[in-house]
């Protein structure tokens, strides 16, 4: 009987642990203020299958535009380097993100420098890079493993998830009207613990997914 109760307790704890895992979309408290208006955002799937938040003007059609003014990505707000995420790494992440997104845009639309007919303006920012302790895996949720996992978390040896947050919009250059808004969160590679440095390689897959989606998105 006691064994049965222990198993039930372990299973319940497992469900609670899994329920507490980080969300795949940006929580409202993580909105940076880069976008002037966050209303209308709805959870949807990107072309590559990632869950994102997006709003598209009902009258927007990709076919109405054939030029784009690409404003380079920035950080918003300006991040403060840490021992886990240094200034050089922050610079390299931004350079890589701009390289990938710009190259992706060039594949599908002509890049220009001046507003005009059939022209969109891109504004975007990396609004956060962080790490958080991974939720307990279900196979760890047994009494002994719970003690071990708890000790690891307390001593800073718990595996950490890396996350990159992005916010962006497209503006019609003729009307200065926002026609699309996107807020997304991407999970990169895990790092061993909170003392392990986050590198560009940790987040490359997140940036690559963003670039892929930019090249594939279409509203007819």
Image (cartoon, rainbow, N blue to C red):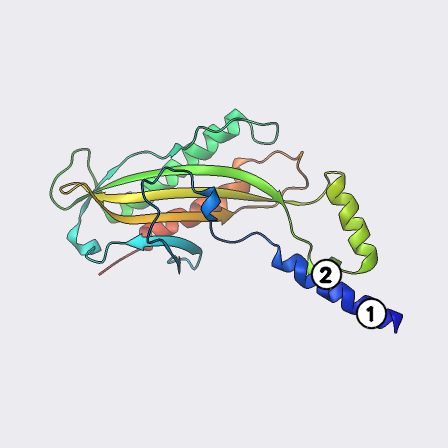
**Mark earlier in primary sequence (2, 1):** 1
The residue under the point 44% across, 44% down is 207
Image quadrant holding the N terminus, namely: bottom right
Q: Marks 1 and 2: in contact by CB < 8 Å?
A: no
Q: Quadrant of residue 127?
A: top left
**Left or right: 2, with 156 as reference point:** right
The residue under the point 15% across, 36% down is 115
Question: Percent position (x, y) of residue 215?
Answer: 32, 51
Question: Percent position (x, y) of residue 104?
Answer: 33, 45
Could you say which disc has been placed on residue 5 in the image?
1
Residue occupied by mark 2: 13
**Left or right: 110, with 90 as reference point:** left
Q: Quadrant of residue 47?
A: bottom left
The alpha-carbon separation of the residues under discs 2 and 1 comes to: 12 Å
Q: Residues within 10 Å of mark 2 (few under 14, many from 20)?
A: some
Residue 161 or 100: which is nearer the viewer?
161
**Left or right: 35, with 128 as reference point:** left
Specify the farthest residue to the bottom. 1
Image quadrant holding the C terminus, namely: bottom left
């Amino acid at each position: 009987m006691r064994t049965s109760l222990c198993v039930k307790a372990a299973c319940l704890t497992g469900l609670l642990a899994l329920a507490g895992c980080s969300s795949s979309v940006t929580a409202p408290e993580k909105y940076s203020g880069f976008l002037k208006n966050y209303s209308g955002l709805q959870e949807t799937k990107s072309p590559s299958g990632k869950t994102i938040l997006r709003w598209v003007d009902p009258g927007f059609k990709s076919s109405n535009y054939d030029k784009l003014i690409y404003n380079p990505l920035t950080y918003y707000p300006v991040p403060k380097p840490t021992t886990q995420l240094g200034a050089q790494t922050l610079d390299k992440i931004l350079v890589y993100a701009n390289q990938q997104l710009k190259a992706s845009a060039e594949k599908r639309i002509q890049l220009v420098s001046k507003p005009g007919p059939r022209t969109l303006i891109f504004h975007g920012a990396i609004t956060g890079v962080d790490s958080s302790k991974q939720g307990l895996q279900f196979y760890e949720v047994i009494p002994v493993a719970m003690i071990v996992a708890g000790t690891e978390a307390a001593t800073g040896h718990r595996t950490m998830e890396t996350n990159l947050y992005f916010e962006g919009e497209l503006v019609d250059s003729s009307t200065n009207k926002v026609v699309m808004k996107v807020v997304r969160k991407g999970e990169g590679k895990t790092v061993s613990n909170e003392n392990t440095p986050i590198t560009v390689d940790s987040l490359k897959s997140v940036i690559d997914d963003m670039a892929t989606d930019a090249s594939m998105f279409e509203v007819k």
